[in-house]
Image: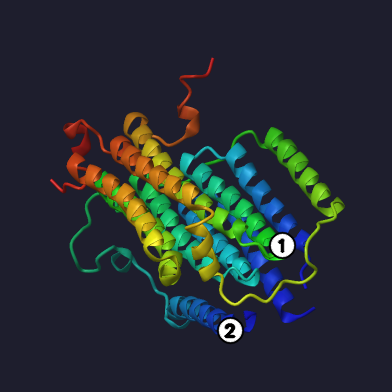
Amino acid sequence: MSYTDAFFYFFAALTVGSALVVTFSRSVIYAAFALLFTFLGVAGLYVLLQADFLAVAQIMVYVGGILILLLFGVMLTTRVTNAEITTGTVQGLPATVVVGILLGTLILLVSRATWNVQESLPDVTGTTTEIGERLLTTFLLPFEIAGILLLVAIMGAAMIARSTDKTKEAA
Amino acid sequence: MIESYIPIFLILAVAVVFGVVSANMSWLLGPQRPNRAKNSTYESGMEPVRTAHDRFSVKYYMVAVLFILFDIEVVFMYPWAVQYRNLGLYGFVEMVVFIGILLVGFVYVIKKGALQWD
Amino acid sequence: MIPISHYLILSAVMFTIGCAGVLTRRNAIIIFMCIELMLNSVNLTFVAFSAYLGDSAGQIIVFFVMAVAAAEAAVGLAIVLALFRNKKSVDINDVNILKW
């Protein structure tokens, strides 16, 4: 086992372990901070997969953006009367059955199939130029549509989050 | 290729170890004789009123949403900037269209008064 | 050398954990976090195939998934905030008007 393999198992363990905390911790704040480590672990895996730019983008967008937004969500919805930000779980048994079937199917599928891929990773130095090239030529239409999607999202978020009732807003 | 990331990994490891150690050092080394006055929020200061878990104003949320918008925009712009000379005017016009679309959202938010701090 | 199936199983496990969270948790914000987990696991699959096939198209798709995730988080949390304003709760069991 080479040391890059060791890195893979380290990041895999970090990702899965913190994902379990996200799902099963009772505190919303703990879940948010565990999500930070999940995102970091995935960024590490991206580096191992030679997607250097994506690793940085992962940290910028998910950790710097989405996670912050989620933490804002936690802070904005704290119950004033009840300071405890904890929640329980529901429907344990049916969920266990569904999730067990899902996981079993996926793992069976992955291990049975023969993947028509290269045996070893080609040694790429930097993916940013190729991404830039293809993003603005082959993937131009999805790129501009992503812009429109973000525009709609920002307008929707501004519309919904901002209460029209000024008296309620002050409360 | 992968080897060049080892310094980054090391600095991450050092940062985590340093943070954990220095956060727990005072708990390990210091004497612990708590009493009521010491445990109060401001020792020999004013009495705190209300709970610290107060709700934030939704105005901060709008700032965070706008931040996400420009975060994504920058992530999309970076590969374009790297390839700027090869793509030339064609790429420039595409990026102007993209930024123009997002700018409409920004103008909308300002006109809507969602960023007004009252 | 890690075979691609390791990456695929890892992302299957991540996806399942996220799915379990969506099915069992009651807090709407935690459900959001679990959806982000599932999106991340799919991204990991894309990047793994992109690397093992030597084709960067998978990585570009991950960019679009990130943009969609950001849009989803912004609008979704705005809905949660509006919900909280009306119901004083983010428990999804309190949102049951559509239930028979």
Q: Name the element at disc 2.
A: helix
Q: Is residue A64 visible?
A: no
Nearer-the-camera pick, A103 or B70: B70
To which quarter of the image does residue C9 belong? Answer: bottom right
x, y (%) of residue C81? 35, 38
> Relative to A28, is C95 above or below?
above
Residue A59 got which mark? none
On what subunit does the disc labeled 1 rest? C
Graded by Cα atoms within 10 Å as few (under 14), some (14 to 19) or many (20 or more), the crowding at tag 1 reads some
Question: Same chain for marks 2 and 1?
Answer: no
**Residue underneath mark 1:** C53
Dot 2 falls on which chain?
A: B
Rendered image: mark on residue B4 = 2
Q: Residue furthest top?
A: C100
| Amino acid type, label 1 | Leu
Q: Amino acid at mark 2?
A: Ser
Residue A69, percent from left and from top:
39, 52
Report x, y in % for residue A139: 52, 53
At 60% from the left and 71% from the top, the residue drawn is: A47
**Quick check: A31 above or below C94?**
below
Badge 1 marks a residue whose secondary structure is helix
Image quadrant for the N terminus of chain B?
Answer: bottom right
- What residue is drawn where x is 40% and y is 66%? B88
Residue that lies at the very extreme toward the left in this rendered image = B118
Mark 2, Cα crowd under 10 Å, few <14 / some 14-19 / many 20+, is few
A39 sits left or right of B106 in the view: right
Q: Is residue A27 above or below residue B108?
A: below
Q: Is residue A77 above or below residue A113?
A: above
Regarding residue B50, the answer to whether it shows in the image is yes
Q: Quadrant of the C terminus of chain B?
A: top left
